Image: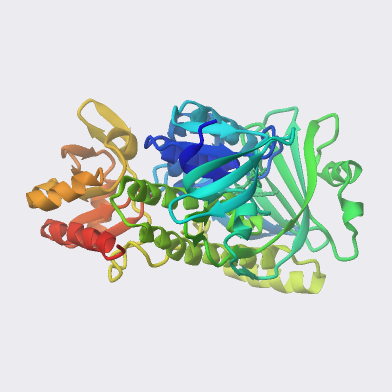
Amino acid sequence: MHDRYDVAIVGYGPVGQTLAILLGQRGWKVGVFEKQPAAYPLPRAVHFDHEVARIVQAAGLGEQLPRLTESADTYEWRNAAGETLLVIGSKETSLSGWPEANMFAQPELERALDARVRALPSVEVYRAAEVVDIRPAPAEVALVVASPGGHRREIAARWVVGCDGANSFVRRHLGSTVTDLGFFFDWLIVDVVPRERRAWTPINWQLCDPARPTTVVSGGPGRRRWEFMRLPGESVADLDSEATAWRLLAPWGMTPDSASLERHALYTFQARWVDRWRKGRLLIAGDAAHQMPPFAGQGMCAGLRDAANLAWKLDLVLEGLAPDALLDTYESERVPQVRQVIEFSIELGKVICVADPAAAAARDAAMIAAAKDRGPTPPVPGPAIGPGLLVDDDPLAGHLFLQGEVRQGDSSGRFDDVVGRGFTLLSPVADPASRLAPELAGFFASLGGISAQVAPGGPVDDLHGGYARWFAANGVGVVLQRPDFHVFGTAPTIDGTAALVGRLRRALESRA
Ligand SMILES: Cc1cc2nc3c(=O)[nH]c(=O)nc-3n(C[C@H](O)[C@H](O)[C@H](O)COP(=O)(O)OP(=O)(O)OC[C@H]3O[C@@H](n4cnc5c(N)ncnc54)[C@H](O)[C@@H]3O)c2cc1C
């Protein structure tokens, strides 16, 4: 075991894995310590959104996504009588260049992420390695790692990120308060592999029956998931058994003859987040920092967004291109967004978790009236990130920027694969770098920035005109995208490029 790391990651769930890849790809020496000897084998998350698909693409798994996922076009909500309350229609294409709703099995994604981690020479993964003590110091942090035989050793890292889940050990060392919205419901989660492969219509749906609120969704290719709410008066023991799982599945045509039960587990969903995500050289990400009800399918998504936000900031700080204080923007940007996603998940839960027949009837009447004469509703777009390293008076800043299909030379495909990723200047008019004086161009190059003219028929050929539409719709002549795909800022004409890059430099310097 090496003794010193640039970054030590505690916990090797999907968030720790993704962060390890994003840092390892930049060549940083990363040590990952996971207390379990083997990966958690059972399904948890089944959905991720288009932004997360783009993050997974950035982690090198883009080509594997079609194998690992099936896209979902419909999420339909029905009442006990089978009447439609709401249809959420998701598209095959999206802002980020991936389907809006991707269904998957978490253990399979984790296996693919693990294989990618293992291919990175600067990343070391230690399993059966529990972090049992943390001793922060000004220049680096000492971690004590225990193995099952009682052997202990100390390692040191410049930065430590706790991706160690809901019962995070690292979190305790931050001494932060937690905001808990106090929204608890117990659900029995049942994952099955039907013996017969067939198309399920709708692929995802919600039965809003007060007699048993039930969710029926894809669990990724070849799998289905049922989620049954625990009713008032029903005990945890009543619900959490294999016999109950089969009894509840029977009306859905799932029996031991037609399907195998992959697992059943009862979860109590929480709605809370940690208020401080950084203390000195310690940071937290993923479930260690926030937990939410799964009704919007966003828990792991939020964790991967944490990893994407943190990775490039750690990269700049480790490289000496930005002061440590840049890491404070991780918290200021992520917490407000996570808070909104948790609140949105609760709003969905309040509609779904209704066991009172009179309240359900009132809900149904209101939703049926609202749904009348309305086609499928698009998924609610994710909220912008909070204040941080952004042009604060630009309404587009902090929102996601798009990834379209492009051609450059002989290569065509998604922008990030064809042109690259990192700080990116784009204009439909000319290459924005041509508007930077040598000194500012040098600063931008030191960040690894890339710059291109993207337009139909242009040097970067905007194959489906998505960039042209975005620039026109927003009245933008140049955009500066951050490495995590969010807009840093824009200007109405390409002549605003130097001011934009100047603001980035000042924003980084002002934190020194
Ligand atoms: C039923 C269910 C359905 C869900 N559905 C969705 C969904 O559809 N979409 C979605 O986005 N999310 C969903 N989620 C949430 C998602 O599964 C989690 O948000 C995600 O797994 C969190 O990943 P993580 O890496 O932060 O933590 P984890 O996966 O929990 O990993 C943390 C790791 O840290 C390790 N660890 C802990 N302490 C130490 C220590 N001291 N030393 C070393 N290692 C340590 C643990 O062993 C663990 O392996 C769902 C969750 C559940 C339970």
Residue 251 position, x and y percent, is 84, 45
Q: In terms of image quadrants, where is residue 364?
A: bottom right
Q: Provide residue 336's location: percent of width, then percent of height.
A: 48, 67
From what the image shows, is residue 283 above or below residue 114?
below
Nearer to me, 148 or 167: 148
Residue 358 percent across, percent down from the top left: 79, 74
> Residue at coordinates 33% horizontally, 61% vertically from top-left?
389
Res. 187 image quadrant: bottom right
**Can you see residue 276?**
yes
Q: Quadrant of the N terminus?
A: top right
Residue appearing at x 59%, y 31% in the figure = 111
Q: Is residue 260 above or below residue 231?
A: above
Image quarter (top left, top right, bottom left or bottom right) of the C terminus: bottom left
Q: Is residue 316 left or right of residue 231?
A: left
| Horizontal and vertical percent position of residue 64 | 49, 29
Which coloring applies here?
A: rainbow
324 in relation to 142, above or below: below
**What's the residue at 37%, 61% (across, down)?**
325
Q: Nearer the viewer, residue 359 or 10?
A: 10
